[in-house]
Image (tube, rainbow, N blue to C red):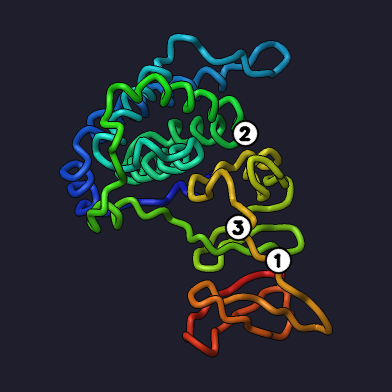
Amino acid sequence: MEYPFEKYRSTQKDKTAFLQLLPQVSAAMPEFFRSLAVAYQSIEQKNMFNQPQGIRQSTGLASSLNLLLVAMVNDKVIGIDAGTTAFVDALRVLVLKWYSFGHDLKACLYFGYYFYTHKSASEHEVKSQLDAVRFLVDENSKKSEDPRIQALLAPPNSTHWYTGENLIGDKLHNLTVQKGDFARVDLPRPGYQITFKNSQMYDLRMPVILSDTQVERPLINDGKAVVSCPSCAQKCRVKLFRHMEIKCPKCQQAWGQSA
């Protein structure tokens, strides 16, 4: 079974830049990946009823997460005043990037299992860890404005999504999640939670949460669909097809989306 992100790879240039620009994160990632991989092996072990036997308490995940969160703030990957959801998304991008340098797939699978399927528990753990480490970092620490770091850690998704009949898709990237793998949520703000509950095909290229402001439901009437351009927000009226290739008449941005 191949996971959607499994062939995701970065260049040697990116790896070199990561090690140089994010020295503390680079030092913390190997232990975080090791503990994630151990945790994944523990849920792979089944009991006589073919159910997971549970997470070993000795994985070291909590302590390695603690060190990584401090490193993220010190290397200015994210500001200490950012919310829990923002920290989780930054963790997602870091894990995917570290994997793309040729590191352990099993670590990514446990990250997906924990942060998508067990969102409440994982966010509670991150929040608890953040409360515990705030005295270790500069309380005025902000996210870096260095364009090299911003480019290096740009997520492999956009902020422009759409809903189709049975899916949610990214307008600017070839990313979709099918019905059964996401759920509608109202708190803390209306949107969609990505769970991968049905397929268990954890795709770390997908954010854990998409807010309503990011997801557009096309207006469909008389065989036509009205959609917004992801670049300039121009409303575009196109003929309705199962899959539509659209080009904005105003800024010439081209994209595809499914009905």
Viewer-closest of 50 and 75 = 75
Give the mark nearer the N terminus: 3 vs 1.
3
Q: Quadrant of the C terminus?
A: bottom right
Residue 189: image location, x then y, percent: 64, 46
Distance Cα–Cα, label 2 vs label 1: 25 Å
* Element under disc 1: loop
Query: Disc 1 residue type?
Result: Arg
Neighbour class for label 3 at 10 Å: few (<14), some, many (≥20)?
many
Query: Disc 3 residue type?
Result: Thr
Q: Is residue 7 above or below residue 175?
A: above
| Disc number for residue 176 | 3
Neighbour class for label 1 at 10 Å: few (<14), some, many (≥20)?
some
Residue 145 as seen in the image, left or right of residue 220:
left
Q: Which residue is disc 1 drawn over?
A: 217
Residue 258 in which image quadrant: bottom right
Distance Cα–Cα, label 3 vs label 1: 14 Å
Q: Residue at x 55, y 76 (%)?
A: 233
